[in-house]
Every structure is written in C-alpha cells, then in structure tokens.
Amino acid sequence: MLTPVGWGVAAASAVLYAAGALLGYPEPVALAVGGFVAVVTAVLWTLPRPRLTVVREVTPNRVARGEPATGVLHVTNTGRVRRAGMRAYDACGGGRIEVRVPVLRRGTAETVRYPLPTDRRGQIPVGPLRLVRADPFGLARRVREYGEPRSLLVRPHTVALPLLPSGRNHHLEGPTSDTAPAGTVTFHALREYVVGDDLRHIHWRSSARTGTLMVRQLVDASMPQTTVVVDTAAAAYADADDFELAVDAAASVAAGAARMNFPVRVLTADGPLVETRGGAHDVEEILDRLAGLSRTDVAHGAVEVARRVRAGGALVLVTGGHGDVAGAGTLRRRFDRVVCVRVRPDAPGPRLPGVALVEISGLAELQAAWKGTTR
C-alpha cells in the first residue's frame, strides 16, 4: 500500500512525464521515470510476507488495577529464509505497544515479553501482533497481523477492611453454617467434602456424577446484608481518577464482607450489579463485575438509588467529591448502619445525624478511617 508520500511521488511523476512529453524536454521525462521506478520498487519491497507463527499469552489474565501484567509472544520463523530483527506493534486496548522481535533463523523460535498497562479497569483486548514492513524512503507500507488476540481483565484494587457491624446479633463465622437457627437455613451451593463435614449433607447424586464427594453448603438467610451503592453519575466526579478510586473503595467494602462469608449486594443507578451470599468465590464475582463499571450521564445519584433498595443491614454509599449526600440522613431509619464514602471532596461534607461520613483521597485513608466506623 502506498503511503501519502508514495502517492505524491507517483502523481508528481505523472505530471512531469506528461509535461516533458508534450514540451519535448527529456529531463522531466527522466525524472518521471525515476519516480515511477522508485514507487514500483517500494511496492515490490513490501510484498514479501514473513512466514511467522505467533502464540500469545497474557500472564496473569486477571490483575488488580496497578499490579503488573505481562504479554508473552512465542514467535517462530516457519519460512525458508533468515529474518532480521523486526519492529512490530501489539494492539492493546485502544493503543499499541512496540515490540522488538529479535533475529530469527529458519525454524527457530524466540520469546518476547513486554509489560501491559493496568492503570485502568476493564476488559482489555491484547493483540493481534501487527508487523509493519516499509521501504527505506517511506513510499510504501504493508501491515500484516499475526496471532490470536487474548484479553486482560483489570479489576479494582482493594485493601483489607473489617466487616461493618449492622447493629444486629450475627453468627461470628458469617452466614455459612450448619447450626443456624431453625427455619433460617437455606441451600447455597455445592462444594467438595472436607474432613469434618456432616455426612448427612453429602449430595450423593453430584458425588456419583463427578467422582468426588460433594456436600451441600447451607447459609443462614437471616444474616444481615451489606449493601454497597456506587454513584456512577459522571457529574459526581472531578475526573476519571476519582471514579477509579471510588470503585476501588466500593470493591474493598464489598469484598471484605464477602470474604467473611456475609451476603453482599452492589448496586448502581442502572440497577443491581451483583448479589451474593458470601464466600471466596463470591469475592471473585464481585471484582469481575466491578471491573466493567463505568461512569454514565444518569441524573440521579447514590442517595436516590439507596431509597429504592430493600431495607435492612448495613448501607455504604460511595460517591465523588461533587456527589450530593445531603439526603443520606433520611436513610438511617431504614438501615441498621449507614456509611457515606466521598472521594477527594473539594470541601468537607455536611454533618449527617446517624451517618458515618468518610472522606478519602486514597485507599490508605479508607483503611485507616474504616476502623472508626466499625466501633
């Protein structure tokens, strides 16, 4: 494919050739012929297709925001000629990453590693590898793609937070229990048998199908729930970094409760995002769902969303410095405990009777301030 420079040279050569032929001057004709030869040579230069096999890996394929992730390319020269070092570009999200492929002799393979950006959450497509071949004068360029794309899931960054008390008595080990009060036990999931499990809870049909002893995991449905409402209104945040911190804070609260086997629900202006009964698997689900959360142009904020939520348990509102929290005090009658987290506010928030107001500019501040809300 000709570049803009190549098209310019071709057009100028055509004009020179026509002018020289009409006026009878050999010099413009000679220049035109030289231009045509240069363009044709450039096109022929880019025609050969390097015969390469590219296998891509992303390790790990799930990371917290800011943690390192690596793209790995296994490049094999399947052609008959030696390939000199090549400069290529691997697509990553909406951008590209320069990759330098070393010299490849016939039939040999090389492994290339390079860091992937993880400063923003989301499902980031990685690949394909684009090999750019151009002539020395920049008249023609051809881009060829190699390798199947992979994806990297960047999830929120979290810190360990203790469970937020709801003001009600609850089982110290969380809702997963075989000795919950009568009438409150319900089936949650199947899991592998571990030594000490009650043999009466073995699910024999699943055990026969999988070849592994499986037991029914029961939950105490009466246990208080932690409800996290994330304000996704774009107007509530000064910039994208503030929203990233808000999602990190919401993920820390929700994952902390789920990790202790308590039920969690996370909501936004668009409705429920995830609702779990608590447990290690539910922590992964919470982080995966929050990885794709983005700001929107909704007109209502976190307080309006919380007013439509089923009452009970602990409520945590997470919003930006421009978010409206003045009405959060009215929610105290519907929940056992209400906490409002504001991210990088321009000015201190209003005093809200019965509501714990936490204002942070980083997760370390959230971790330190959270201890005061659990007393």
Image (cartoon, rainbow, N blue to C red):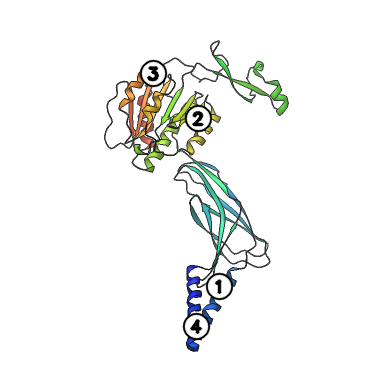
Please identify the residue farthest to the front as the structure is shown. Answer: 22
Q: Earlier in the sequence, mark 4 or mark 3?
A: 4
**What's the mark number on residue 42?**
1
Question: Secondary structure under badge 3?
Answer: loop
Q: Amino acid at mark 2?
A: Val
Q: Residues within 10 Å of mark 3 (few under 14, many from 20)?
A: some
Query: Spatial distance from mark 2 to mark 1, Cα to Cα?
Result: 56 Å
Q: Which residue is mark 3?
A: 334
Left or right: residue 305 versus residue 187 is left
Depth check, front residue: 309 or 118: 309
The span from disc 4 to disc 3 (Cα, nearest Å) is: 85 Å
Q: Are marks 1 and 4 in contact (CB under 8 Å)?
A: no
> Would residue 171 be found to the left or right of residue 301 on screen?
right
Q: Nearer the N terminus, badge 1 or badge 4?
A: 4
**Helix, strand, or loop for circle 4?**
helix
Residue holding disc 4 = 31
CA neighbours of label 1 inside 10 A, class few (<14), some (14 to 19), many (20+): many
**Which mark's residue is nearer the viewer, 1 or 4?**
4
Crowding around mark 2 (Cα neighbors within 10 Å: few <14, some 14 to 19, many 20+) is: some
